[in-house]
Structure formats: C-alpha cells, structure tokens
Amino acid sequence: MNPLKMFSMASTAMSVMGAIAEGNAKKAAHDYNAQVSERNAKVAENEAQSIYDAEQLQISKFLKEYDNLASAQSSAFRYNGWIAEGDTPLLVALASAAEADEEVAIRDLNARTGRQMNLEEGLQQKMNADLQTMYGKQAKKAAFFNAGSSLMGGYGNYQMIKAIA
Amino acid sequence: MKVPTYTSQSALSGKSGGKMLSVQASPAGFSQVASAFKNFADTTSKVAWSMYEQEVKAKRSSDLAAAQNTYDKQLNEYALASLSNNDPKSIVSNWNSSTKSSMASIANGIEDPVVKRRFMSWATDTTTDKTLGVMKVARSKEIDLGKAHMFERVNNLKRTMAEGSQVEKTGASRELFGFSGVGRSGEKITSLGIYDQMASLGYITNTEAVGLKEGAKGDIDELEVRTSLATIGVNEDEQAATDLLNSLLDPKNYSDLPPEVRNSLINTTNTLQDSIISSKISRTRQEQAAAEKLIKSKQREGSQKFWASIEGGKPINPTELLRMYTNDELTEKSYTAYKDFVQSGAWANVDDELLRLELTNDILNAQTDLELENLQERVNSSFEEKLLEGDTAVQLQKEITARLDKTNISKEKKFYGNLVDELKVEVENDNRSYDQLALDALLLSDAKSTYNRIITDPNSNMSPQEAYEYVRDLYVSGIQLKTRDLPLQPQILEFLQDKGLATNSSKDGRILDLEAFTQENWMEVMDHIVSDDIMDGYEKALDLQTLRERWDDWNTLAKRRRTKFSPFGKKTDEDGSIRLLTQEEYNEEKNEKEYRKKLLLNSVQKELGQ
C-alpha cells in the first residue's frame, strides 16, 4: 500500500482514539463531581436531622423550665395565700401555660423548617450529582460521535480523493 | 422562699458537623491532554490526506498523460496507414476498428478507474476530431481513384487511336473527344468526350479539360510514331526508318506533336536507323566469317579423310584428290603434297624427332577444340614440308581426332548460343511501351551477334559460358539505361530518392534503380502521385504514364531474372531426352576428364622415357 495512504489512515485512527480518550476524561471529571455532590447531599441531610433533634431537645428543656416556672408560680401564689387553683392565679397559670404552648409550637415549627431547609439543600446536591453523572454519560456518547466524525472524515477524504482527485 | 435548683448552662447546637464541599473537577481541564492529542491527530490527518490527494492527483495526471501519448501515437500511425490505403471504402472502417481496439486495449491497461474514465472521455473526443480528417482522406482518395480510372481509360483510348483499325479509331475518338452530329431521323446527337465528363464530375477543371484534350492529340501522334518505330525495330526495315524520319522532319506531318517530342522522336528514329544499318553490316560480316569457317572446316574434314584412308591402307587416288580440291575440300598445298605422297609411295625418310615430340606434347596438353584444330593443321603442314614421315603424320592425326571427339567445347558453344536466343522473354498480356519493344528487339539482336563474334574470334580468351554472361549483362544493362532522365515532377523524384529507389548524379541525371524496386514500391509511388496536392490532373496523368512504362520494364526485368538456365551444359539421357546438368554432375565430369588426361600423359612420358 502507498506509504502516504497508510499514514493518512493511521492519523485518522489516531484522531478517533483521541476523541474517545477525550470523552473518557470528561466523563471521569463529571463522575468525580457527582461523587462530591452525593457526599454534600449526605452532609445536608445530616445537618437537617441535627437541627431538628437540637430543637426537640430545646423544647424538652423549655418544658422542663416551664414546669419549674409553673411550680414556682403556684408556690408563690400559695405562699401569698392565694388559692392557686382558682380565680386569678388560675387565669395567670392558664395564661402562662398558653404562652408556653405557643413557645413549644413555634420552636417545633422552627425545628421542622430548619430540617426541611437542609433536606432541600441535600436534595439539590443529589440532583447535582445525578446531573454530573448524566454529563459524564453524555461526554462519553459525544466522544463516540466525535470519533465517528473523525472516522467518517477520513473515509470521506479517501473516497473523495479516490473519486475526483 | 426560694429553693435552689440546677439549670443546664450549655446551649444546644443545631449543626451536624458536616461541611459542604465546594471542590469541582473541570471536564475541560481533565480532558485537555486527550483533547490536544485529538487536535494533533486531526491536524496530522488533514495534512496527510492533503498530501495523499496531491500524490494521487500527480499519479493520475501522469498515468493519463502516458495513456494519451500512447493513444496519440497510435492514432497518428492509423492516420498514416489510412493515407497509404488505396481502398477508400476500407479506410474509415479500418480506422474505426483500429481506434476502438486501441482505446479498449489502453483502457484495459489502466488500473485506476478515474484515470480510465478520464482517458476514455479524452480519447473519444480526440478520435472524433481526427475521424473527420481521415474521412476527408477517404473522400479525397475516392475522387483520386475515380480520376485514376478515367485516366487509365484515356490511355487505353489513346492506344486504340494509335494502333487500332479505322473503325476502332473512330470509336475511340468519339469517346475521347466527344461527338456532335445528326441521327438517322434528323435528330441532333451530342455526346461528351471523356475529358468533358471528368470536368462535369468535378475531377478536373474545364481549363484542364481543354489542356488535356490538346495534349491528348500530341500523345496520340507520339504513340503512332512509336508503334511504327517498334515495327521497324522488329523487322529491321531500314527503308521504313528512313521514310519515318523524313515524315517526322516535315512539320506538316504529325502536326499535334510538341516540338520537343518531335525532336526526341527524330533522334530515336535516327538511332534506330543507325542500329539497323550496323546490325546488318555485322550480320554480313558474320555470314562471311561463317562461310570462310565452313570452307576451312571442309578442308579440315578433307585432310582427316585423307589420313584415315592412309591409315586404312587404301589411300585416296589422285583423281579423287583432284575432285576434293575442286570442291574446296583440300587446300592447294595439301592437294599437291597428298598427290605426290600417293603417287611416289614414299615420303620423308626420317622424322624431325624434336618436332614429333613437341607435337605429341602439344596434342596432350591441348585444352580446346581450336588448339587441336590448329595442331591438325600444323601436323599437316609439317608433313607437306616433309618434316614428318607418313606413318608419324597418320599416328599424330589419329591422336588429334581421338581427342577432338572428347572435348565438349562445341556442345557448350551451342548450348550457350541457345541461351542467348532465350534472353528474350515472352511477357503475358504484353502491354509494354513501344520504345521498350523496339529497344528489346535491338538489344537481343546485338546480344546474338556479339556472342557469335566472341566465340568465333580465335584471339578471344572467353569460354562460351563467359561470352554468354558478358552479352547477357550487356542486355540487362541496356534495359536499365533507358531509365535515365526521368520526366517526373521534382517532388516525385525526391520521394523516390528518399526511398532509395532513384539516384541522382551530375553525369547521368536521375536514374531509377529498378533492381531496388518491389511490387509494393510501385503501388506506393503511384499512390503518392495520386494523392499529391501540388500537381494538377494532367501532370499526374503524365507521371502515372511514365511510371507505368517503367513498371513494364521492371516486370520484363523481373521475368528475365527468373528465366532458368544452366551454365553446366546439357546431357542426353538413355531415353534420348535432353536435360540440363547440375553443378555436381558438371564437376564429376570435369574431374573424370582431368583423370583421363593425367593417365594419358603418364603413359606418354613413360614411353618417351623408354
């Protein structure tokens, strides 16, 4: 075979191999990024659970503190000679209890909201990981098409030369 | 009262301890090596394919050029072949088949289909272009062929007018020059002459037709004179030659002859007249010599008869000797000596011994009849002068007679004399020119007389075979001499010289070398004349006529070359038939003769020694 023809075909083959290698490298980069996002998603989920657990503990602590407050209030009424279980002391106790309930409800809402926010962040990271994985796959597919394009280019050149040079 | 209680101091942290990572891999950066490699490969591929394309282009261009050159060369060859093809009908068909075959053959040798396609396209266009030229040649040849046929007819008509009967002449004249008259029922009859027909067909112009008509009248006169010359030459009619010469000298006769042709014919007639006269003188001399020879032969036979009678014991009586003398069978001297010898019964008492030995030796060494005949006369004269005894003279005469019988010289003379007669070859459908016929007759007559003169000349050293070869060569060269100063157009002469068929020397002028011609050469030269662009129809006709005459000469020469003859003598076989000897037989006979001579010489030497 003509040496120049062999060289031309070899260079086309190199081009094909280069396209595939480029695709593989891009896929590896995207896979790496996906792994990082996956890990970040896990971190966000952990963060969400931590926020919720911390708020629940705060609520428990508040209830305990309120219980102490209610006992002290009741004792104080009694000490002052008032009947703690009726009239004004009762109203006061009820008002305090209502306040405490509201506090608990707010803190619970905040815990849930904080958890939800981090879960959302985790979800975003996970989605990003999926996206990177998809990018990697696309890069690989693109590499095949690029390789095909190089191959077709070489074949086309050969046929064009053969036909009309 | 306040009761102390423990209250936790630390605040709860909502953080899990994990941290979001911001590290990101860049696909572009990660793939830059592979990408660079790909770019490098792309560039290399682009350059390599470009180079490959250039190389393919160059190779295809070179292959195509080579194929085109080959085809071009073959096309030129076919075009040249079409020029030398005499058959216009086959020119185009030959051209088509040759070009088609060449095109296919060359295309089959091309591997690259693109080059093959391009070559086929080019070859088709080129062939079409050249085909027009070839068709033009074919058409031109067709016209030339038609013209040539017409001119051939013209020549035949001219010949008929010169040689034919009155009726034939009238018919030929009408065909040649046309006719205009009135028919039986009073209608006007007009017919075109052949020249007018040629003009109407477009073969020649009307001006040429008029010129040719005028020229034809001169040609007919010339042919008529040449016919007379041929007849005079064959009959050796001196008076007719003189009459023709006188007739030519008067311009009123043969009035259409051009002056230069008239002069040439006057010279030819003069030469012919001289030749006839010298031939007649030569023949008279020969007849006289033959008569003298006959008397001498009779006298020799008379002497032989006398010696035979002495040997036989019954000598011829004086009365018979006298009769022989009066009949020229004996010389006066012989008669006197024989008569005295017969009457006295005795002769010289003693031989001249030296003379006897000398004569004996001479007899043994004699090679020819002539030598032996001279010895016979010497013995006779020695006897007459009384230098030899009668018995000795008888013995010597006997030996001479015996040797004379053994020589072949007489046979050879006769054999080669016959060959000289056969030099004239009968040509089938003889249509040679009148010049040629007259010259042939003169040359043959000259050859015969020269041969006879040589073999009867006692001073000639030539054998009959040598004499025959000498006159034969003279005869052949006589034919060739006629080809000098060819009246052909310069370009035709140059063509002949280029072909090596004619020479040009300041001394002899242009000479056609008939020996170098082949049958194909004649056709080639005639074709060349027909297809010449410079000459007009009249010039072409003249050149063709001249060549036609030379062709007749060549044909005669070729047939003469093929005439069989044997320089080795003839032999009569047992059944009486005569055949020519082969060289082997000739050598065998010659060796046998030498052997016999040697034996005889030995025996004589022995005898002399004793």
Image: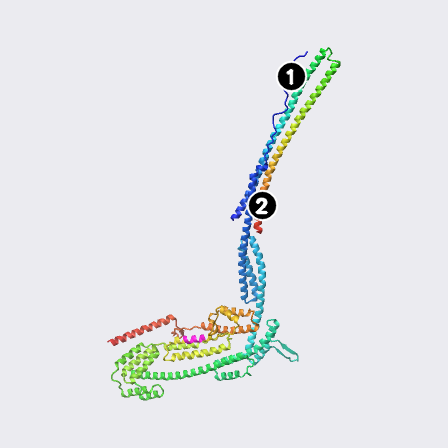
Secondary structure mostly seen in magenta is helix
Q: Is residue B135 above or below residue B304?
A: above
Of the pair B74 and A90, the residue shown nearer to us: A90
Q: Position of residue B291 (x, y in %)?
A: 39, 84
Amino acid on which the number 2 mark rests in the picture: Gly
Q: What numbered label is drawn on residue B7?
A: 1
Of the pair B328 and B55, the residue shown nearer to us: B55
Name the subunit of mark 1: B
List the single residue furthest toward the left.
B610
Amino acid on which the number 1 mark rests in the picture: Thr
Cα distance between the residues tagged 2 and 1:
80 Å
Q: Position of residue B551 (x, y in %)?
A: 50, 72
Crowd tier of the residue under label 1, counting other residues whose Cα lies within 10 Å: few below 14, some 14–19, many 20 or above: few
* Residue that badge 2 annotates: A153
Q: Is residue B154 visible?
A: yes
Q: Is residue B377 above or below residue B141?
A: below
The magenta segment: B469-477
List the single residue furthest toward the right.
A87
